[in-house]
Amino acid sequence: MKEKKRVFQVISLLIFLILGIMSMGGSEGILFDKAVLDFIHYDANKTLVKIMEFVSFIGSETFLFPTMAMVIAYFIIKKKYYIATLLTTSSLGSYLLNHLLKQVFQRNRPFDYFLVEQSGLSYPSGHSMVTMTMFLTIGYLLLRIKKEDSYRLKINSFVGLYIGIMGISRLFLGVHWPTDVVGGFLAGYLFYKFYISMIKEEWFLNKRSQRS
Protein backbone atom coordinates (compact mmCIF):
# COMPACT_ATOMS: atom_id res chain seq x y z
CA MET A 1 0.00 0.00 0.00
CA LYS A 2 2.81 2.42 0.90
CA GLU A 3 4.57 1.68 -2.39
CA LYS A 4 1.39 2.45 -4.34
CA LYS A 5 1.02 5.75 -2.48
CA ARG A 6 4.62 6.68 -3.27
CA VAL A 7 4.13 5.86 -6.94
CA PHE A 8 0.99 8.02 -6.99
CA GLN A 9 2.88 10.88 -5.35
CA VAL A 10 5.72 10.63 -7.86
CA ILE A 11 3.25 10.61 -10.76
CA SER A 12 1.45 13.62 -9.23
CA LEU A 13 4.73 15.51 -8.97
CA LEU A 14 5.67 14.70 -12.57
CA ILE A 15 2.28 15.84 -13.89
CA PHE A 16 2.52 19.05 -11.86
CA LEU A 17 6.00 19.80 -13.25
CA ILE A 18 5.03 18.92 -16.82
CA LEU A 19 1.99 21.23 -16.72
CA GLY A 20 4.08 23.97 -15.14
CA ILE A 21 6.84 23.71 -17.73
CA MET A 22 4.35 23.59 -20.62
CA SER A 23 2.59 26.73 -19.41
CA MET A 24 5.63 28.60 -18.03
CA GLY A 25 5.59 32.28 -18.93
CA GLY A 26 2.66 31.77 -21.28
CA SER A 27 -0.56 33.68 -21.92
CA GLU A 28 -2.42 30.97 -23.82
CA GLY A 29 -4.13 27.75 -22.87
CA ILE A 30 -2.48 24.34 -23.21
CA LEU A 31 -3.92 20.88 -23.78
CA PHE A 32 -7.67 21.02 -22.93
CA ASP A 33 -7.68 24.55 -21.42
CA LYS A 34 -9.55 26.46 -24.12
CA ALA A 35 -12.01 23.67 -24.85
CA VAL A 36 -13.06 23.42 -21.20
CA LEU A 37 -13.41 27.18 -20.68
CA ASP A 38 -15.31 27.60 -23.96
CA PHE A 39 -17.74 24.89 -22.84
CA ILE A 40 -18.24 26.38 -19.35
CA HIS A 41 -18.67 29.93 -20.65
CA TYR A 42 -20.92 29.11 -23.60
CA ASP A 43 -24.02 30.27 -21.73
CA ALA A 44 -23.01 31.60 -18.31
CA ASN A 45 -25.95 31.96 -15.91
CA LYS A 46 -25.86 35.22 -13.88
CA THR A 47 -27.26 33.56 -10.76
CA LEU A 48 -24.66 30.83 -10.98
CA VAL A 49 -21.96 33.47 -11.38
CA LYS A 50 -23.04 35.05 -8.10
CA ILE A 51 -22.98 31.66 -6.38
CA MET A 52 -19.50 30.94 -7.71
CA GLU A 53 -18.32 34.38 -6.58
CA PHE A 54 -19.43 33.49 -3.05
CA VAL A 55 -17.72 30.07 -3.23
CA SER A 56 -14.50 31.75 -4.38
CA PHE A 57 -14.78 34.33 -1.60
CA ILE A 58 -14.87 31.70 1.16
CA GLY A 59 -11.75 30.19 -0.42
CA SER A 60 -9.88 33.50 -0.48
CA GLU A 61 -7.32 34.78 2.01
CA THR A 62 -9.76 37.59 2.91
CA PHE A 63 -12.10 35.02 4.46
CA LEU A 64 -9.79 32.13 5.31
CA PHE A 65 -7.03 33.91 7.19
CA PRO A 66 -9.23 35.56 9.87
CA THR A 67 -11.33 32.40 10.19
CA MET A 68 -8.35 30.07 10.51
CA ALA A 69 -6.61 32.50 12.88
CA MET A 70 -9.55 32.22 15.28
CA VAL A 71 -9.67 28.42 14.96
CA ILE A 72 -5.92 28.10 15.49
CA ALA A 73 -6.05 30.45 18.49
CA TYR A 74 -8.77 28.27 20.01
CA PHE A 75 -6.64 25.12 19.73
CA ILE A 76 -3.61 26.92 21.16
CA ILE A 77 -5.68 28.00 24.16
CA LYS A 78 -6.81 24.38 24.54
CA LYS A 79 -3.13 23.34 24.30
CA LYS A 80 -3.82 21.26 21.19
CA TYR A 81 -0.52 22.32 19.64
CA TYR A 82 -0.31 19.49 17.11
CA ILE A 83 -3.69 20.41 15.62
CA ALA A 84 -2.82 24.13 15.67
CA THR A 85 0.47 23.44 13.86
CA LEU A 86 -1.18 21.33 11.17
CA LEU A 87 -3.88 23.96 10.54
CA THR A 88 -1.28 26.75 10.40
CA THR A 89 0.82 24.81 7.91
CA SER A 90 -2.18 23.89 5.77
CA SER A 91 -3.29 27.52 5.46
CA LEU A 92 -0.34 29.89 5.78
CA GLY A 93 2.26 27.37 4.60
CA SER A 94 0.27 26.41 1.53
CA TYR A 95 -0.44 30.06 0.71
CA LEU A 96 3.24 31.04 0.89
CA LEU A 97 4.34 28.03 -1.17
CA ASN A 98 1.71 28.83 -3.79
CA HIS A 99 2.99 32.39 -4.06
CA LEU A 100 6.52 31.07 -4.57
CA LEU A 101 5.42 28.57 -7.24
CA LYS A 102 3.57 31.28 -9.13
CA GLN A 103 6.74 33.36 -9.24
CA VAL A 104 8.60 30.37 -10.65
CA PHE A 105 6.13 29.54 -13.43
CA GLN A 106 5.01 33.11 -14.27
CA ARG A 107 1.88 32.08 -16.16
CA ASN A 108 -0.70 34.73 -17.06
CA ARG A 109 -4.39 34.37 -16.33
CA PRO A 110 -6.99 33.74 -19.10
CA PHE A 111 -7.98 37.40 -19.41
CA ASP A 112 -10.40 36.79 -22.29
CA TYR A 113 -12.58 34.64 -20.02
CA PHE A 114 -12.73 36.95 -16.98
CA LEU A 115 -16.20 37.36 -15.44
CA VAL A 116 -14.70 39.10 -12.39
CA GLU A 117 -11.53 41.11 -11.87
CA GLN A 118 -8.55 39.14 -10.56
CA SER A 119 -4.92 40.14 -10.24
CA GLY A 120 -1.78 38.06 -9.89
CA LEU A 121 -0.31 35.11 -11.72
CA SER A 122 -2.11 31.91 -12.65
CA TYR A 123 -0.22 28.62 -12.16
CA PRO A 124 -0.92 26.89 -9.87
CA SER A 125 -4.35 28.07 -8.67
CA GLY A 126 -4.04 29.39 -5.12
CA HIS A 127 -7.68 28.71 -4.20
CA SER A 128 -7.36 25.10 -5.39
CA MET A 129 -4.03 24.50 -3.67
CA VAL A 130 -4.88 26.04 -0.29
CA THR A 131 -8.34 24.45 -0.23
CA MET A 132 -6.81 21.06 -1.02
CA THR A 133 -4.24 21.21 1.78
CA MET A 134 -6.61 22.74 4.31
CA PHE A 135 -9.54 20.39 3.81
CA LEU A 136 -7.38 17.29 3.53
CA THR A 137 -5.97 18.32 6.90
CA ILE A 138 -9.43 18.92 8.36
CA GLY A 139 -10.54 15.54 7.03
CA TYR A 140 -7.44 13.89 8.50
CA LEU A 141 -8.12 15.40 11.92
CA LEU A 142 -11.81 14.50 11.87
CA LEU A 143 -11.07 10.90 10.89
CA ARG A 144 -8.88 10.57 13.98
CA ILE A 145 -12.04 10.91 16.08
CA LYS A 146 -13.99 7.96 14.65
CA LYS A 147 -12.97 5.05 12.43
CA GLU A 148 -16.37 3.77 11.24
CA ASP A 149 -16.67 3.27 7.47
CA SER A 150 -19.91 5.29 7.26
CA TYR A 151 -18.31 8.23 9.08
CA ARG A 152 -15.21 8.01 6.88
CA LEU A 153 -17.39 8.02 3.76
CA LYS A 154 -19.27 11.13 4.90
CA ILE A 155 -16.07 13.04 5.74
CA ASN A 156 -14.30 12.04 2.52
CA SER A 157 -17.39 12.91 0.45
CA PHE A 158 -17.70 16.34 2.06
CA VAL A 159 -13.99 17.10 1.67
CA GLY A 160 -13.95 15.94 -1.96
CA LEU A 161 -17.11 17.87 -2.83
CA TYR A 162 -15.88 21.09 -1.26
CA ILE A 163 -12.48 20.90 -2.94
CA GLY A 164 -14.09 20.12 -6.31
CA ILE A 165 -16.60 22.98 -6.11
CA MET A 166 -13.82 25.42 -5.22
CA GLY A 167 -11.88 24.43 -8.35
CA ILE A 168 -14.99 24.66 -10.53
CA SER A 169 -15.74 28.14 -9.18
CA ARG A 170 -12.37 29.41 -10.42
CA LEU A 171 -13.05 28.03 -13.90
CA PHE A 172 -16.60 29.35 -14.00
CA LEU A 173 -15.41 32.85 -13.11
CA GLY A 174 -12.78 32.55 -15.85
CA VAL A 175 -9.87 33.56 -13.63
CA HIS A 176 -7.88 30.34 -14.10
CA TRP A 177 -7.03 27.91 -16.84
CA PRO A 178 -8.20 24.34 -16.09
CA THR A 179 -4.58 23.20 -15.90
CA ASP A 180 -4.02 25.83 -13.18
CA VAL A 181 -6.68 24.14 -11.10
CA VAL A 182 -5.27 20.67 -11.77
CA GLY A 183 -1.81 21.94 -10.84
CA GLY A 184 -3.20 23.55 -7.69
CA PHE A 185 -4.84 20.31 -6.61
CA LEU A 186 -1.66 18.32 -7.23
CA ALA A 187 0.57 20.82 -5.43
CA GLY A 188 -1.87 20.99 -2.53
CA TYR A 189 -2.01 17.21 -2.22
CA LEU A 190 1.78 16.84 -2.35
CA PHE A 191 2.33 19.60 0.20
CA TYR A 192 -0.25 17.97 2.50
CA LYS A 193 1.46 14.59 2.30
CA PHE A 194 4.82 16.23 3.00
CA TYR A 195 3.89 18.13 6.14
CA ILE A 196 1.70 15.36 7.55
CA SER A 197 4.72 13.07 7.39
CA MET A 198 7.08 15.71 8.80
CA ILE A 199 5.01 17.08 11.69
CA LYS A 200 4.90 14.23 14.20
CA GLU A 201 2.34 14.21 17.00
CA GLU A 202 4.72 12.26 19.23
CA TRP A 203 7.04 15.27 19.38
CA PHE A 204 4.27 17.46 20.81
CA LEU A 205 3.23 14.77 23.29
CA ASN A 206 6.82 14.36 24.49
CA LYS A 207 7.18 18.13 24.95
CA ARG A 208 4.00 18.26 27.01
CA SER A 209 5.07 15.33 29.20
CA GLN A 210 8.45 16.97 29.84
CA ARG A 211 6.76 20.16 31.02
CA SER A 212 4.33 18.38 33.34
Image: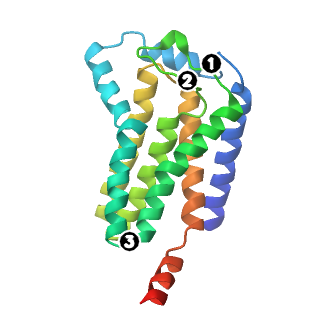
Q: How many marks?
A: 3
Identify the residue shown where x is 45% and y is 54%.
136
Q: Amino acid at mark 3?
A: Lys
The answer to the question of whether label 2 and label 1 lie on touching residues, with beta carbons closer than 8 A, is yes
Q: Which residue is mark 1?
A: 29
User: Disc 3 vs disc 2: which is toward the camera?
Assistant: 3
Q: Quadrant of the C terminus?
A: bottom left
- Residue 184: percent from left, percent from top: 55, 38
Q: Position of residue 86 (x, y in %)?
A: 47, 61
For marks 2 and 1, the one nearer the N-term is 1
* Callout 2: SS: loop
Question: Relative to residue 187, is residue 31 depicted above or below?
Answer: above
Q: Residue furthest left?
A: 47
Distance (Cα) linking label 3 and label 2: 39 Å
Q: Amino acid at mark 1?
A: Gly
176 versus 94 height, above or below: above
Q: Is residue 19 visible?
A: no
Dot 3 falls on a residue whose secondary structure is loop
What is the CA distance from the residue labelled 1 to the residue labelled 3?
Answer: 45 Å
The residue sitting at 42% across, 10% down in the picture is 42
- The reply to whether the C-beta atoms of the residues labelled 1 and 3 are less than 8 Å apart is no
Q: Nearer the viewer, mark 1 or mark 3?
A: 3
Toward the viewer: 14 or 25? Answer: 25
Disc 2 marks which residue?
177
Disc 3 target residue: 80
Could you say where residue 4 lies in the image, as x and y percent from the top left?
63, 60
